[in-house]
Image: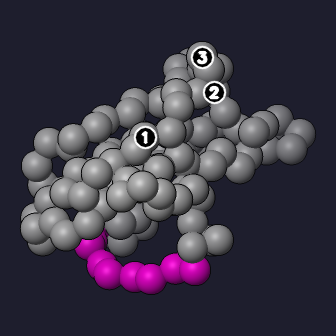
């Protein structure tokens, strides 16, 4: 979902290499770890948490935020929040409406 369309839900498929999350399946578990591309845009934060390993039926909600300024610093800041909801294995259609099995809040202060 995106803010520009009023957070209207929609189905989509992406080539895995274009999604900013590392997903690796080993030993009947799914390893989930969001990639952080724009290092210059990270607000101050402590060390990144380790990857999450899900068993079938579990899901994770992982939140990361960013801040950007113009190249010359003339304009104000722009802020961006990514929320990844990732389920592993067969789950109900409404799985993301319940509390996540694992919640990672990696948001930093945007002062």
Residue 16 in the image: state x and y as whole percent: 57, 73
Q: Nearer the viewer, residue 71 or 47?
A: 47
Q: Quadrant of the N terminus?
A: bottom left
Quarter of image, res 9: bottom left
Q: Nearer the viewer, residue 69 or 101?
A: 101
Residue 46 in the image: state x and y as whole percent: 60, 16
Q: How is the structure coloured here?
A: one colour
- The residue positioned 73% from the left and 46% from the top of the image is 38
Residue 22 in the image: state x and y as whole percent: 57, 56
10 Å crowding of disc 2: few (<14), some (14-19), many (20+): some
Q: Quadrant of the C terminus?
A: top right
Q: Is residue 51 left or right of residue 69?
A: left
Q: CA distance from mark 3 to mark 1?
A: 17 Å
The count of marks equals: 3
Kind of element beneath mark 3: loop
Residue 20 in the image: state x and y as whole percent: 59, 58
The span picked out in magenta is 6-15
Query: Which residue lies under the disc numbered 2?
Result: 43
Query: Which residue lies under the disc numbered 3?
Result: 46
Kind of element beneath mark 2: loop
Determine contact: label 2, label 3, CB under 8 Å: no
Q: CA distance from mark 1 to mark 2?
A: 22 Å
Q: What is the magenta segment's predominant secondary structure?
A: loop
- The residue positioned 63% from the left and 71% from the top of the image is 18
Residue 30 in magenta? no
For discs 2 and 3, the disc positioned in front in the rendered view: 3
Q: Nearer the viewer, residue 49 or 9?
A: 49
Kind of element beneath mark 1: strand
Q: CA distance from mark 2 to mark 3?
A: 10 Å
Residue 75 seen anywhere in this rendered image of the structure: no
Quarter of image, res 78: top right
Query: Which residue lies under the disc numbered 1?
Result: 52
């Amino acid at each position: 979902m995106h803010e520009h369309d009023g957070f209207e839900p929609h189905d989509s498929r992406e080539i895995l290499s274009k999604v900013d999350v590392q997903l690796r399946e080993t030993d009947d578990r799914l390893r989930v770890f969001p990639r952080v591309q724009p290092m210059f845009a990270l607000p101050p934060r402590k060390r990144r948490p380790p990857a999450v390993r899900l068993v079938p039926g579990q899901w994770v909600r992982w939140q990361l935020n960013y801040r950007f300024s113009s190249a010359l610093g003339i304009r104000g800041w722009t802020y961006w929040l990514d929320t990844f909801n990732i389920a592993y294995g067969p789950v109900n259609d409404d799985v993301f409406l319940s509390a996540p099995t694992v919640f990672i809040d990696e948001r930093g202060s945007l002062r």
